[in-house]
Image (cartoon, rainbow, N blue to C red):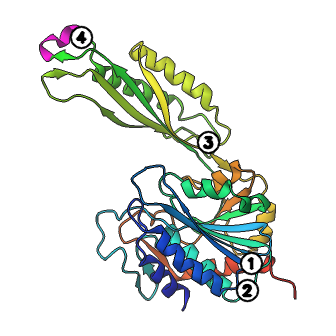
Amino acid sequence: MDVAELLAELIRHPTHNPGGDEPAICRTLERALRDRGADEVLVAHVPREEPSAQAGAYVLARWGEPRTVINAHIDTVPANSGWTVDPWAGIVTSDRVIGLGAADTKGAIAATLAALESVKPHNVGVLFSGDEERTGTCIKHFLASDWARVIERAIVCEPTGRTVGVKHRGCNAFVAEVEGRGGHSSGADHMHRPIVTMGKLAVLLDELATRWLDRGPEDMKGLCLNVASIEGGVAFNVVPNQASLTFSIRPPPGFDLQAFEAEVMDHARRAHDHVRMRSVLSMVPFATRDAAPFRKLLGGLTGPEATLPFWTEAAAFSQAGIDAVVIGPGDIVQAHAPDEFVTKSDLAWAVDVFKHVLESHAAPG
């Protein structure tokens, strides 16, 4: 089966997150990896952080004692509106494969499997992990396992347009909350109005974002500060007794998050003395420590080193002491979009890249 048809088969496994079946595709991948001569293959089922959600899963294969691991994620986002074809049909045309996850990142999985058909690697691992699109439970589980202890470097697959991702922003989300006594709206002129407080805080945060536009590294200026929602209230004639505001930032590597949180709290107190703030998401920024070993592994097949505009699980590897780069077939503009696709030429390129990685770890003899 060629790489395009292999990808189409993977797309036909619905792995949208939430709601998809990660264990089922892992069983399929387990068989494929055993057929390609892995010394050991493991499928792990990992409970999600949401108690009602179906378990996540990952499949890991090794040839020898893995020093390098190729990682791609098996889950996808739910199908966006606007698709003109069945997102799970896996449609192969003359120049592309169309389907949910084609670029993000089942194309990389198919290319890795295709590369393994002609190369017997040595001291390398392959990790196809779930729950990347939400809470990252699977990569956390893997990095806490004994399998991760011998790994020195990771090639994390995302659609990078043939460039090599060596750094990207993190992502932090916060909820600010304030309470009042609430009551009949006829008394609104003389009451604390929590939603108004959150509105003031939103304006102050927007002003803070503007001041940050010229701050930071040259290729990552600003914070991408986003006021995402203000919530509270039950009816037009009721003064709410509470309100909340959710916002996020995407900080560059080296960002002083503690100092930023203190700065935000100063602004919050300007809106109201009793505003509370809590962190609800923390995904660290990423920067490759030493790209030279990866350049040798990838050969002359890739484009330039790049700063990526999106978060990846390379940050989780890096935080665990495993250096990483990000590379894979497709372009991020196709990811999460209707009629997602990857070109056949990109798939062929990715097969060559992963062959080069595997041949660099080829079994002796």
Q: Which region shows up in magenta?
A: 185-191
Image disc number at residue 119: 2
Residue 348 visible in the displayed image: no
Kind of residue indicated by mark 2: Val
Rounded to the nearest angstrom, the CA distance separating label 1 from label 2 is 7 Å
Residue 172 rendering spot, x and y as whole percentages: 52, 39
Image disc number at residue 358: 1
Considering the image in quadrants, where does the N terminus appear? Answer: bottom right
Image disc number at residue 32: none
- Give the answer, above or below, for where 99 lies relative to 205: below
- For label 3, the residue is 252
Residue 230 rendering spot, x and y as whole percentages: 32, 32
Question: Which one is in front in this view, the residue at disc 3 or the one at disc 2?
Answer: 2
Callout 2: SS: loop
Residues at marks 4 and 3 touching, judged by CB atoms closer than 8 Å: no
Callout 3: SS: loop
Kind of residue indicated by mark 3: Pro
Residue 23 rendering spot, x and y as whole percentages: 49, 70
Rounded to the nearest angstrom, the CA distance separating label 2 from label 4 is 72 Å
Name the N-terminal-most of marks 1 and 4. Answer: 4
- For label 4, the residue is 191
Q: Is residue 213 left or right of residue 350?
A: left
Name the N-terminal-most of marks 1 and 2. Answer: 2
Residues at marks 1 and 2 touching, judged by CB atoms closer than 8 Å: yes
Residues at marks 3 and 2 touching, judged by CB atoms closer than 8 Å: no
Q: Is residue 306 left or right of residue 174?
A: right
Q: Quadrant of residue 299?
A: bottom right
Looking at the image, which residue sits at the far top? 190
Kind of residue indicated by mark 1: Leu
Residue 161 rendering spot, x and y as whole percentages: 57, 67
Crowding at mark 3 (Cα within 10 Å: few <14, some 14-19, many 20+): many
Looking at the image, which residue sits at the far bottom? 1
